[in-house]
Amino acid sequence: MKAKTILIVLIICFFTSSAYALSEAYKNNIYNPGELKPVDSVLKVKEGDAAPDFTLKSVSGKTISLNGYRGKKNVVISFVPAAWTPVCSDQWPGYNIVKDIFDSHGAVLLGITVDNIPTLFSWTNQMGKLWFEVLSDFWPHGAVAEKFSVLRSDGVAERALFVIDKKGIIRYIDVHNINQRPPLETLVRAMEKLN
Amino acid sequence: MMTAICFAEINPPQVGGVFPEIELLKSSNPVDLKYLGLSGSGIFKIQQVKADVVIIEIFSMYCPYCQAEAPAINELYGLIENNPVLKNKIKIIGIGINNSLFETDIFKNKYKVAFPLIPDGDFKLHKIIGEVRTPYFIVVKLKGGKTEVIYSKLGALGDNKAFLEKIIKSAGLK
């Protein structure tokens, strides 16, 4: 019985502790959903496919279409599951200090979640001034995530990276374990292969 | 009971206590090694740093406050290095929580950090030092192979000169 109690305690401690979103920037405002199913969607697009076009509103008030970058810029799309959650809050601030790397590969970054604009506004404000556009895939809910086949069964997006070249072709896909942050070097290597 | 066990697991180093035994990866950069008075490769322990006091910044490349705090820590480094009395007595290291070497190097280059930044890619060190939030600062006094924590606090250091005076006093440096 005692051993069973200790085991339960250890399990609770393990799953309730989150080592992401540790920055004081977020104070105690991060909701921890606990350990989630790593991937909860079936990828239907592949590298070499034409990326599905979309148009979404950004937090900065712009209307952004993927096709608008055709022939001009490579595009990195970073889908993250939800605002105010541990790993997501610990991903874009890192991208925010490597604009030079994106620039050197002729790439722009588009961050997308299924949250609405007011929520994204409040959340991203904690990250400092972001150089990249943050887009809301709130309505029709998750439609763009669905186009890229990274909408999970609970209505949030996967933690997924897509690298799309200037011709609009998907050159790299990483539908990552939702519980972990994708290593930055892997994304950088993917951008290096564009040129 | 559950709370007590969980709390015990995440308690950060306390002032007056010993610093946990952690193994840190030596930098491959000779400048970093020279700064800490180390040589060779592999791992080292905090007691092996050639200094009387080591300031440890627990940070992450992905942490907005750590990014904002970087210039202030660089200023602290400058205050120490430009002071002939303190230069060889106080050293600074950073531990990048859940950061790869690639990521700590990005932080180092972006903010022109002159002191060594050590990656903790798998949270191994982070767990030992109490899963603290970032930025978190721990100051360790070294003497005869032993350690004593003289500062352990979450958040920005504030006024660097006042912080240094506090450390000098706490460590008994002259």
Image (tube, coloured by chain):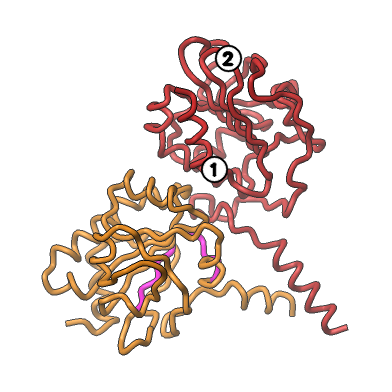
Chain colours: A red, B orange
Question: How dense is the environment of label 2, judged by Cα within 10 Å: few (below 14), some, or many (20 and up)?
Answer: many
Quarter holding residue B147: bottom left
A17 with respect to B79 (left or right): right
Determine the secondary structure under disc 2: loop
Q: Which residues are magenta?
A: B130-140
The spot of residue A48 in percent (x, y) is 64, 20
The residue under label 2 is: A168
B128 is higher (above) or lower (below) than A17: below
The structure residue drawn at horizontal position 51% and vertical position 71%, both measured from the top left corner, is: B129
The structure residue drawn at horizontal position 58% and vertical position 24%, both measured from the top left corner, is: A171
A176 with respect to A149 (left or right): left
Q: Which residue is the extreme one toward the front?
A: B40
Residue A91, disc? 1
Task: Determine if residue A90 is in view.
Answer: yes
Q: Is residue B91 magenta?
A: no
Quarter holding residue A43: top right
Q: At label 1, which amino acid type do we have?
A: Gln
Foreground disc of the pair 2, 1 = 2
Q: At label 2, which amino acid type do we have?
A: Gly
Q: Which residue is the extreme one toward the left?
A: B84
The spot of residue A92 in percent (x, y) is 52, 39
Query: Who comes first in sequence, dot 2 or dot 1?
Result: 1
Q: Is residue B134 magenta?
A: yes
